[in-house]
Amino acid sequence: MNIKANVNLILILSIFTTSGILTVAAQAGQGANTDKSTILYVANEGSNTLSIIDGSKQIIIASIPVGKTPHHPWLVPGGKYVFTDNRGEDTLSVVDVKAGKMIKTITVGKGPTHIVFTPDGKYAYVANTKDNTTSVIDLAKLMVTATIKTGGGSHDPAITPDGKYVYVTARKPGHVAVIDTATNKVIKNIPTGKKANGMRMTKDGKFVWVGNTVAGTVSVIDTKTNLVVATINSGAGTHNIRFTPNGKYAYVGNMKAATHTVIDTNTYKIVATIPTGKGANIAYFHPNGKYVYFSTNKANEIPVVDIKTNKIIKRIPIGKGGTHNLAFIDGGKKLYATSWFGDYILVIDTGKNEVIRKIPSKFSNGIKVKGSPPATGRG
């Protein structure tokens, strides 16, 4: 081979080598950017899909067909799967995150609505709201292993930190069923009030707070004795309950009264009543600990409250109303909100408290951030 040919060969090899290095570098760069992205999962009841959203870019990167009327996405321990609870066909869809598709359908009871997972990551308990049962799912086999009669309108489950007991509200009898997870038997039904509905367990598992929607009350259950130790008049349509990160206060949504009551968890006294709006639902605490944002199922705005004063400092207009679930990303700089009637997912700049983007979506409902802990019904 002559010198000229050698030079040409060296140039060609150099180009290919450099090109390869540049390609690898580009791919590494893309991978790094992807790793830094915040991924969110959104259940869309109007299109029977699970949206996967790049929170940093504020775009839908995948839309996966699931079962009929998916209510929430549920992050399965280990991160391999996301479940959707499909109220329109009484099933769970199992979405393989890596493959980006639904791989299995699990038939449960009627109207599956809320799920909790055992601390060991082996089982899920599914409350079936249009039924009188709670289904137990073996997460390794992805199949129902037990069906427990917990009472008509079984709705909200919560699991103790040690995984020994699951508490489930039952709307029709107005009680809370206590399940022993070792036997999957109900060991006690605790009467609380008419339409026992929304429920939250304290982080330490010592108390369960129950919103009795028709009664307009909150019942507090001591999990050591399984007795009601307090009943608090909260407001018409009492439903969802959330505790402040330090556990000192409970924020209770009163849907018909269009308010949130703030209750001291030590004294059980109401310290504030906030006019949050129609369909007052769930309180979401900003990571900086200074503000609370509220979902309101029937209002055209998202109220923002100063947690020190419990005064509304802003009502963020969202257009067509109805927010159900909210999720903070980027350390609280952005807030994502699902919208029941607006056919979009809202992106909010929390520095300005303004909507900066509306991502098209039909009747978006539940929302979860990838990497957040599996549901326990506590806190």
Image (tube, rainbow, N blue to C red):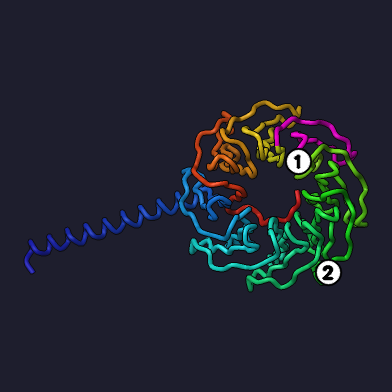
Q: Secondary structure at mark 1?
A: loop
Q: Residues within 10 Å of mark 1 (few under 14, many from 20)?
A: some
Residue at the spot 66% in from the left edge and 32% down from the top edge: 303
Please tell me in which quadrant of the rendered image residue 96 appears: bottom right
Left or right of residue 99, residue 189 in this image: right
Residue pointed to by mark 2 = 185
From where the camera sits, is residue 295 visible?
A: no
Can you say whether 314 is above or below 161 in the image?
above
Q: Earlier in the sequence, mark 1 or mark 2?
A: 2
Residue at the spot 59% in from the left edge and 63% down from the top edge: 93
Residue pointed to by mark 1 = 244
Q: Nearer the viewer, residue 108 or 182?
A: 108
Residue at the spot 59% in from the left edge and 67% down from the top edge: 105
In front: mark 1 or mark 2? 2
Pinpoint residue 50: horizontal percent, then vertical percent.
Answer: 54, 55
Q: Amino acid at mark 1?
A: Thr
In this picture, which residue range is highlighted in magenta? 253-278
Q: CA distance from mark 1 to mark 2?
A: 32 Å
